[in-house]
Amino acid sequence: MIAFLKGAVSERRPDSIIIDVNGVGYEVNIHSRLFPRLPQRGEPILIHTFLQVLENEFKLFGFLDQDELRLFKTLLSVSGIGSKGALAVLSTMEPLVFYRAIASQDEKTLLRIPGVGKKTAQRMIFELQDKVPELKLVEVEKEQRPLLDELMEALEILGYSRSEVLPVIMDLNRNKQLGTSVEENIKLVLKAKAQEMRR
């Protein structure tokens, strides 16, 4: 798995970018909203990536932040939505706009996405409705996200699912009960989970 690429911009196109990493050029597919935010040729870049393994080729998709990468991977879980459809969503709207449309069952907003008709919009809402709570990290202040992401990863390693512990994490964060270390926060989450089970 290639989690990210760090190098220099070799070429820029509206739908892709070539990144020079120690003399090796990686072609990375991007969504159109990303293009204006890219560094110029020769400038340094760090881009989060998703590697798609197809029958006859490998494709890399790149994102400047984790929120967009997370949404891209979530969209691929929807039946009938491939990488092209997922990029169309990200080319049209910010992740938070999409999540709110799913949460409020706002078909009108989803129909703005190229290639999305009424049936696809309804399928997105149906299949992603239960996944929106897992993705509430997008509403957290940016400076808090790395700590919460690290906490989530640590809990997943311990065998907990996102849907199981994320509501607890969000409650603790909302009440300003989380500390500054992952170890401390794991104890807080597990304690809160235990109290929840005793109710």
Image: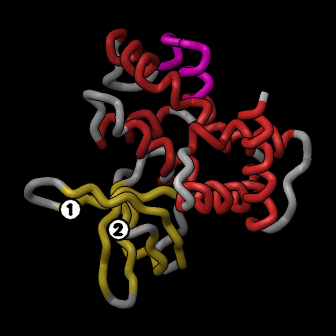
- Residue 189 higher or lower than 105, as above or below: below
Q: Position of residue 101 (x, y in %)?
A: 57, 20
Residue 85 placement: quadrant: top left
Q: Position of residue 158 (x, y in %)?
A: 56, 59
Q: Position of residue 150 (x, y in %)?
A: 65, 62
**Nearer to the camera, 136 or 86:** 136
In the current view of this chain or complex, which residue is farthest to the bottom?
Answer: 22
Toward the viewer: 151 or 78? 151
Residue 34 highlighted magenta (yes or no): no
Farthest residue to the front: give it: 198
What range of the chain is rendered magenta? 99-110
Helix, strand or loop status at disc 2: loop
Q: Amino acid at mark 2?
A: Met
Picture quarter with the C terminus: top right
Q: Nearer the viewer, residue 166 or 92?
A: 166
Task: Check disc 2: other Cα within 10 Å, few if <14, some if 14-19, many if 20+.
Answer: few
Q: Identify the residue shown where x is 57% and y is 37%.
A: 163
Residue 34 position in % (x across, y down)? 50, 51
Which residue is rendered at x = 52% and y = 25% of the image?
A: 130
Q: Is residue 139 above or below residue 180?
A: above
State the residue in front, 102 or 19: 102
The overriding secondary structure of the stretch rendered in magenta is helix
Does 71 sit left or right of 187 as displayed?
left
Labels 2 and 1: the sequence-earlier one: 2
Q: Which residue is found at the position 79% from the left and 43% from the top?
A: 192
Q: Looking at the rendered structure, which numbered label has been put on residue 58?
A: 1
Q: Is residue 104 magenta?
A: yes
Task: Give the SS element for disc 1.
Answer: strand
Say which residue label 2 marks.
1
From the viewer's perspective, is 180 left or right of 80? right
In the picture, the quarter occupied by the N terminus is bottom left
- Classify 10 Å Cα crowding around label 1: few (below 14), some (14-19), many (20 and above): few
